[in-house]
Amino acid sequence: MSGARVLIVGGGPVGLAAAVFAHQAGLTPVIVEAGASDGDKACGEGLMPGVAPLLAELGIDPPGHELVGVSYSHGNTHVEHLFPDSSGRGVRRTALVDALRTRADQCGVERIRARVTGVDQDRQGVRLVCADAADQHADYVLACDGLHSTIAAELGLVRPPAKNSRRYGLRQHFYRAPWSSMIEVHYAGDTELYITPVATDTVGVAVLGPKGLSLQETIAQVPAVAKRLAGATPASSLRGAGPFPHRVKKARVGRVLLVGDAAGYVDAITGEGLRVGFAQAKEAVASIRSGSPESYPGRWRAVTREFRVLTRGLVVLASSPLRGRIVPLAHRFPGLFGAVVNRLAS
């Protein structure tokens, strides 16, 4: 459906990627965004090796720090795995958004600052009701507006998560030369602490766990990390995210397709959110370009299935009495641990 006008709600990495993919497919994308101008939010910022081909397709090469593998630690037990074929990259979310915005501008993508307050559709098209701007009309809408998707809520698609499954995240950067080129994961009490090098002088620190978690208290529970970060100057403000998971009833309603976190999100535990989000954006655009938006739910399931299964399994383990055995078992069975990391990395 060459030339179709596609409104993309959300100007984060997934929305910007969707716009670039849409332009490359001969569609007419328009981004409607109301979020922070720098595009920043709490996330782990580790791009796995599997993202590289998608970045190449998008035509961007954001600055960052090489990631050669993943390490897990729990107390004195430690296990690590190197990516077998290529490296990942730690990239500040703001740097990734800047690179994608520049690319979208090069493609001539229109961007409108407006807050979407409603959505109507019929067989001919879709109308977005907007605050602070005129209502917008298009052939299709891609909802790329994240965990708290206005579009998903307006369409009545959001499923409430079970109260006992809710997890949250915090993230902050510190000026400190990275001491490793790995993503470090440290199990501390009932939380997980993630260290991701994102520049030659900066590391990102994130924590996942139950409501009320504290970044500084979690760091203090991991003496090796606390020592390295002692006296380090914050390089960003503390940001939070959650609750996880975000569940929706379906990924498409008529001419509206949900993409990225808006279409459902399990947990940040694997760091695969952006790779899967970019893949969804590509498939959503392909379904519109082929004139078969009804194919998108099947495409969505195909590109998210492995991520959803592995992530749910890891979250169940991390929330169970077996939590304390995760790293010792990975240390005892390095082949199995490596296989899981490789699947997530690809």
Image (cartoon, rainbow, N blue to C red):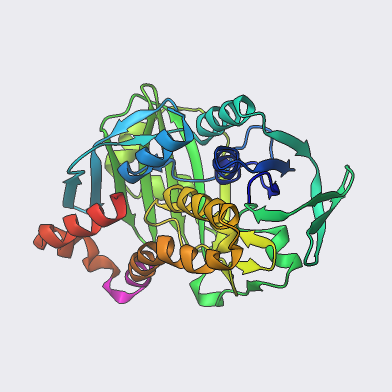
Residue 281's spot in the image, x, y percent? 53, 51
Give the quarter of the image for residue 301: bottom left
The structure residue drawn at horizontal position 59% and vertical position 72%, both measured from the top left corner, is 250
Main SS, magenta region, reads helix
Let me know if residue 9 appears in the view.
Answer: yes
Up the image or down, 123 lies above or below 111; here it is: below
Residue 30's spot in the image, x, y percent? 71, 41
In the displayed structure, does residue 321 sit left or right of residue 1? left
Magenta-span inclusion, residue 172: no
The front one of 194 and 88 is 88
The structure residue drawn at horizontal position 41% and vertical position 50%, both measured from the top left corner, is 218
In the displayed structure, does residue 118 sit left or right of residue 10? right
Residue 78's spot in the image, x, y percent? 17, 51
Q: Which residues are magenta?
A: 315-322
Let me know if residue 220 appears in the view.
Answer: no
Magenta-span inclusion, residue 316: yes
The front one of 112 and 238 is 112
The structure residue drawn at horizontal position 77% and vertical position 67%, both measured from the top left corner, is 123
